[in-house]
Amino acid sequence: MNEIVNLNRARKIRTREEKRAQADANALKHGRTKAERIAEAARSEQARRILDQHHMDEE
């Protein structure tokens, strides 16, 4: 005899797997690696510091 399968559970598992596959594809397409995010944050912080250094106070 075959194993009894709960069809609702099988449907939910299949849907969950499809969503996970879609999310992985979107992450590859649109996402950035952690190293890229850290590098961008460092560049942004450096640019902010340079801009602050060139700021002239009004006296």
Image (spheres, helix red, strand yellow):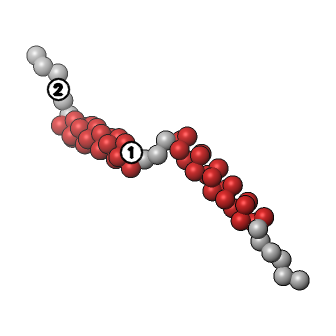
- The amino acid marked with disc number 2 is Ile
Q: At 76% from the left edge and 68% from the top edge, which residue is drawn?
A: 54
Q: Residue furthest left?
A: 1
Q: Is residue 22 left or right of residue 32?
A: left
In the rendered image, the vertical position of residue 54 relative to residue 37, given as above or below: below
* Residue bearing mark 1: 27
Q: At 38% from the left edge and 45% from the top edge, which residue is drawn?
A: 27
Quadrant of the snapshot with the N terminus: top left
Q: Is residue 12 left or right of residue 26?
A: left
Task: Say if mark 1 contacts mark 2, CB within 8 Å.
Answer: no
Q: At 38% from the left edge and 50% from the top edge, which residue is drawn?
A: 30
* Residue bearing mark 2: 4
Q: Position of residue 42 (x, y in %)?
A: 65, 50
SS state under label 2: loop
Residue 45's disc is: none
Q: Nearer the viewer, residue 20 or 31?
A: 31
Sequence-earlier tag: 1 or 2? 2
10 Å crowding of disc 2: few (<14), some (14-19), many (20+): few
Q: Residue furthest right?
A: 59
